[in-house]
Image: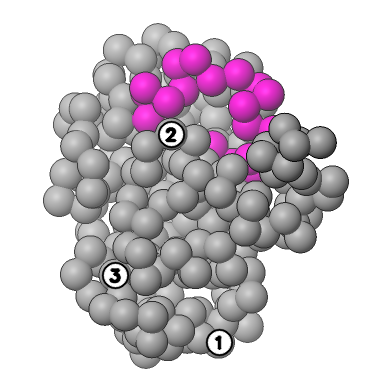
Amino acid sequence: MPDSYKIIATLGEDDIRNLQKKDVKDVDVLEIRLDLFSRNYIQKEMKKKIKTLGLPALFTYRRAEDSSVKSYVKLFPEDVEGILKDFNDNSNYLDIELNRDDTIFTNYEQLNFRIIYSYHSFKKSIYAKEMREFIQNSKPVKKKNPIYKFAITPEDIEETADFMNDVKILAKTNTMIGICMGESGIISRVFGDHFNSSYTYMTLSEPKAPGQISIETFRKLRSDLFKGYIPKEQKEQE
């Protein structure tokens, strides 16, 4: 895995069931999209599976209107109480949406998770002034230095460039993640580290967000980050 620019792999229940440790060797954090799991799996199988994979977990819950993929079930705070208790330390993460007043993660600011404050727009971009206002108005948390994630939908590559340059400016004083969704934003997922974005989101199967690419594709595009990496096609020719 890269020494910097951490890889977050977004997972639903269909992805994680047969996942083995060797499958996540290039992953830094497992994003557990709780809205893509059944209540039964969350309560009975999730803890053991995550522990088996041996990586930090980021717990995210997206409501239907805030996601590009269909949810399994609507969850309530009591549905995730056990998971929050089992993984409550600062090696794990919680995603809290900046542009929502409510969350199923009750009293998250008092927990030991590292917080990723996130903002998503499937319709437009956002500018540095607005991002700075969201950051300044975010709730203080127990574990200081939260991460700020902004994921937007640019109209074109020029808007992608403007947004990522704004992320670079804000990264001087904050830990930032900048994601541009859609095809014109793929550069933000592959080369986000050039704009001081600290993490990128990948998939191990079907994309969970517009423009999300596989880790294998990322390796090909950023072989400079992976020591000794040889593309599968090249191995077959040798």
Find out whether the residues at labels 3 and 1 contact each other: C-beta distance under 8 Å: no
How far across and down, in percent of the image, does residue 38 sit? 27, 20
Residue 171's place in the image compared with 18, above or below, is below
> Which residues are the magenta region?
11-31
Q: Is residue 177 above or below residue 158?
A: above
Sequence order check: which comes first, mark 3 or mark 1? 3
Quick one: 136 or 194, which is closer to the camera?
Answer: 194
- Which three-letter amino acid code belongs to the residue tagged 3? Thr
Q: Residue at position x 35%, y 15% from top?
A: 41
Query: Of callouts 3 and 2, which one flags the residue occurring earlier in the amino acid sequence?
Result: 3
Q: Residue at x 36, y 75 (%)?
A: 134
Q: Which quadrant does the C terminus fall into?
A: top right
Residue 3 seen in render: yes
Q: Could you tell me which quadrant the N terminus lies in?
A: top right
The amino acid sitting under disc 1 is: Ile
Q: Is residue 174 magenta?
A: no
Task: Report, in whole angstroms, how far the alpha carbon at label 3 lies from the one at label 1.
Answer: 19 Å
Residue at x-position 63% and y-position 31%: 24
Q: Which residue is mark 2?
A: 205
